[in-house]
Amino acid sequence: MRQMEQYSTSAQGMEVKTTAAKRKVNPADIKLPPGYKIEVFAEELNTPISMIITDKGEMLVADAGVTSGNGKVLRLTKDGFRVIADGFNPPLTGINYYNGNIYVSHRGN
């Protein structure tokens, strides 16, 4: 299993290196009813916890941040996922969208 290195900033402002095993993604591992199929949509996400679609049709994904120490919100673009907000205390537990605003649930201070 391939290892992935990630860097994050601790609460004390120090850079911290974490190593995590690459997640195994095999659609055949999921049992589906006859007539249904499944395929991999996105890889290289750390700990995705929820997903929403805005009124503009944009997909937003919340990353809980439990492996990196950094909860974040990502937007799907034509080039992949782009971080649009981060620095939330893990675990980030969800996101919502209302009247053009993104609301984030996380363990705050």
Image (spheres, helix red, strand yellow):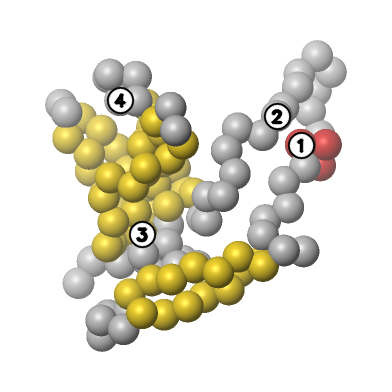
Which residue is depicted at the point 77% across and 64% down?
Answer: 1
> Is residue 52 rendered to the left or right of residue 48?
left
Whole-angstrom CA distance, mark 3 to mark 1, is 26 Å
Check disc 1 and report its element: helix, strand or loop: helix
Occupied quadrant, residue 51:
top left
Which residue is depicted at the point 15% across and 26% down?
Answer: 99
> Mark 2 or 3 closer to N-term?
2
Check disc 3 and report its element: helix, strand or loop: strand
Marks 1 & 4, CB-CB < 8 Å contact:
no
How would you rate the neighbour count of disc 4 (Cα within 10 Å): few for under 14, some for 14-19, many for 20 or more? some
How would you rate the neighbour count of disc 2 (Cα within 10 Å): few for under 14, some for 14-19, many for 20 or more? few
Residue 86 locus on image (x, y percent): 28, 56
Q: Which residue is mark 4?
A: 54
Marks 2 & 3, CB-CB < 8 Å contact:
no
> Mark 2 or 4 closer to N-term?
2
Please name the amino acid that badge 1 sits on: Pro
Residue 69 locus on image (x, y percent): 40, 70
> Is residue 34 rendered to the left or right of residue 86?
right
Q: Which residue is mark 2?
A: 39
Whole-angstrom CA distance, mark 2 to mark 3, is 26 Å
- In the displayed structure, 51 sits above or below 3; it is above
